[in-house]
Image (spheres, grey):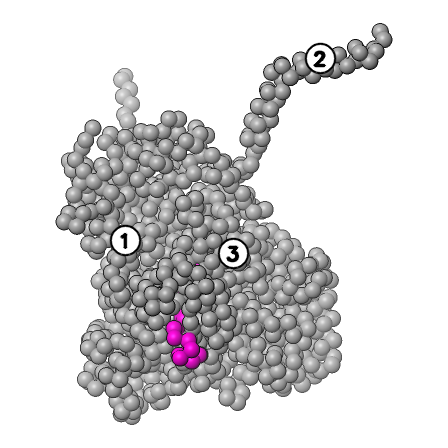
Amino acid sequence: MKHEQQHNPPMKYGMAIDLDKCTGCGACMVACMAENNVPFKEDESNKLDSITWIRVYKLTNDKPYPDTDICYLPRPCQHCEGHGGHSPCVSVCPATATDYSRETGIVSQIYTRCFGCRYCMAACPYHARYFNWWDPVWPDGMEKYLNPDVSPRMRGVVEKCSFCFHRYQQAKDEAYLNGERRVSEAAYQTACTQACPTGAIVFGDLNNPDHRVHQIVQPDPKNGNKSRNPRAFRLLERLGTNTKVYYLSSREWVRRKGDNYLEHEKTGQVAKAHH
Amino acid sequence: MKVDRRSFLSFVIGGAAGTALSPLPWKLMDDSSIWSQMWPWTPVPPDGEVVYEASTCSLCPGGCGISVRKIDNRAVKIEGQKGHPINDGGMCMLGLSGLQLLYGPTRIKSPMKRIGERGEGKWQKISWEEAIGLVTKKLTDIRDKGEAHTVAAISGSDKGTVPALFKRFMTAVGSPNFMCTPSRQFADQLAVNKLFGGAGYTGFDLENADYILSFGSGIADGWGAPVRMFKVCSHWKEKNIPVVQIEPRLSNSAAKASRWLPINPGTEADLALGIAAVMLSKNWVEGDSVSGLRKWKKDLLAQFDLQQVAQITGVDADTIVELAKGFAKANRPLAICGRGKGQKAESLRETMAVYALNALADNLNQTGGMWAISESDYIDWPDVRPDKLASESLRQPRFDGAGSGQYAEARYLASRLAQGLEGDGPYPLQMLMVADANPCHELPDAKKVQAALAKIGFIVSFSSFQDETAAMADLLLPNHVYLERYEDVPVGAGLPQPAIGLTKPIVSPQFNTRHLGETLLALAKTMGGGIAEAFVWDDYESCLQETLADKWDTLMEDGVWVESDVDTVSNSVKLAAVNQPGVNAEGDPSSFPLLLVPYDSIRISSGYIGDAPFMIKTVADTVIKGKDGFVEINPQTASAAGLSDGDLATLTTPRGAAAVRVHCFEGIKPGVIAMVQGLGHTAYDGFLAGKGVNINELIGPVEDPSSGYDAAWGIRAKLAKA
């Protein structure tokens, strides 16, 4: 008898973040820090060295009082696919410490391989990567809450959002144990998605039409995975980074903030493939 | 062999030269640098079987359900409980940071007595027996002199079994001086009493309303049960429900609302009454449930002229008419109040004006409306029978004056504490006990409170954390934190249905602390006599179980109990006095041209609990930079004062001065400046201490003339370049 082993069709994990719903409460940031053993220092007001895998930015429409408006934008790692897995950071890493997974679409970061050259930080257009300038120090007793599923990082390495990859590994193990071939939508959710009180963050497989994120985004593979949802945009979409984090906003000024548009340019364009 | 001097020297020198030329020193140096790099600076968290345990978060009044991930006896992560009626899986960052509070270095690890000067921070660890003995001796001495009334207590709440035990203990000892920290809850209770004619509090069915007027309530900044409110905001967005946020600053709530309406701060009541006047004059009022409407209408229309209201509030007349129309014509309109998190006191005038709007819209005790919920207490213990010593002391007036004379309608007036200690009080205080409260930081005019507390002979703190008040104490009897204890958590927090949550011990106590309920029972037992008789329970757990009675099983199983059949105070409202006296900001506008208002942020804990390191980390560098705190100002106002973004300035109010940095922000009304609440701690650790300014040191209490409750909403101020 002939045994044929089948590969799962590749997944492409991504997010849709509804900025109309986000209140800027920051629960995602803290849920992430608690899940991923992110360290903290006494002074975190220098935001350049403050490690926040997901960071909530405050945008303003630059209009004077009383027409001022603000919008919060949570920014995890955008998990760029680029063209065929050529993420900006992956292409420059001399240590193969960061890689694009064709199985999940997740950009990984292997701390023990990283030797801290920080090329990836320079390459990342989203400031999603952070360097450990110091060894992490947990005040006496606080190391008790550390999560064994995520190794604490040492000084001299770069770290970033992993879409809570350890949760994917657990969900996969569990699925196989239960005799399932695929990880269900509910079984694998990131810590930020889970904590978000407004339901602004939706996470799942962009390739799977049953997943909510696919239904919201409706990615168009023929058009660089641009969303078919008129409210959706991606950050610096015209760079061709082909990110997997989509943002939704009903406000044109917010969508405009997603890229460096010239005055006459319209939003909603997408990069042409260039090699 | 004979070793002479010459051969010895040549051996040593030759050996040294040989070693230096060999790779050995370089190899050792290299190795040592590798070893020092390889040192396990980073901890390796121990692995083990993962379990999840459900409990309730009691860090704020919201009462969310939590699910704690555990490995052995280690709590690893707090997550939201799916399906919980309040938060359904969602969390706020304070709740998520709970483990940093549990395991943090600011815990008080054992009972301690002061050995240095007060506030010097020199403590000696003592046993629980000794600690209980010290309190007992002090209390007995005071009682034997017939001065039990000179003992006072401050609690963060008066709801639930632990505050009830605390209050009961005070009564049994003979002190009438149980106080709660000021909160909007008391203005709310008073307004319900005056309008509905019974004891109760309000709840708001925000999920089912279809037009919202929010008078500064932080719908996305932590008002009520914060996670419920975040969910409601999303629901409103999905359903396109008009939400009008009325406040002088573009807060997160204003940004989430469908419309931000800047108003002159402190004139919210005028706007509410102005809207009511428009509704009445245009006959847009249903008002079936309102009695006394005819006279009220006459008085209101006589007093409120549209143009005048527009001038006072800074909201133009057309907008007021538009709001009145929108509110009156909606199917289920709802107006809410309580600035920011709604945890600070508020004037009776404002509260009643907003509730009157709801009454005029005829939305009382129904879907999508405002509920007046009866104060039904599940704590039904037999009354304390005070012994002779106690009865005599209980006849003394309350130290804060609440409940008699001009303050007859007030329950507690902790805001009058400092004033009383400085000679205004009926007698000096000899002893103060503090639980779940940090008066030295959270009361208005905090510096003055701190100085006044120094006049009290003996201060006992039950705090779990090294807060400002614990630093002033003579004796520390630390309580377990919520993850180490059983406790009932009654949740009001604006929910339309009253709920009770239950905290459970998720981990065994980390330090030598004791449940406050147990401490109080132990104190009563050692005091003996009538005091011991008032406490019949063997331990706190049996007290809790007995008190919750038939709710206990539900609570143990589901972690929460929700009242399905809400008992309302009354379905009709009696409108009597149109216009309660208002509350103005302290200070003279000619010498203090600006208005300073506090604002709330969900990222900064502003009550008894200090901000955890994770939370402070998320605070923007336009709120804290290094140790400097910022004041928000409109660029137009800033440039008129010669200030630009980031400048250091001196902020002066009639109550004090502070060095601040200036953050220019277009989203604030010109002439108004705003500063966040909850910063400027002197206690706690380096993650929190010394950052920013405690706005409570710059704002003093302003008594609401109708109750005596503190109702300060801001203060006059000036800014000068430093």
The residue beneath circle 1 is A19
- Which residue is painted at 50% across and 47% down in the image? A41
Mark 1: few/some/many CA within 10 Å (<14, 14-19, 20+): many
| Amino acid on which disc 1 is placed | Leu
The image shows residue B167 at horizontal and vertical percentages of 58, 74
Q: Are marks 3 and 1 on the same chain?
A: no
The residue beneath circle 3 is B688
Mark 1 chain: A
Q: Quadrant of residue B63?
A: bottom left
Mark 2: few/some/many CA within 10 Å (<14, 14-19, 20+): few
Q: Are marks 3 and 2 on the same chain?
A: yes
- The magenta segment: B585-604
- Residue B541 lies left or right of residue A260; in this view the side is right
The residue beneath circle 2 is B14
- Residue B35 lies left or right of residue B122; in this view the side is left
Q: Nearer the viewer, residue B413 or B382?
A: B413
| First of labels 3, 2 by sequence position | 2
Q: CA distance from mark 3 to mark 1?
A: 30 Å
Q: Quadrant of residue B329?
A: bottom left
The image shows residue B436 at horizontal and vertical percentages of 55, 65
Mark 2 chain: B
| Amino acid on which disc 2 is placed | Gly
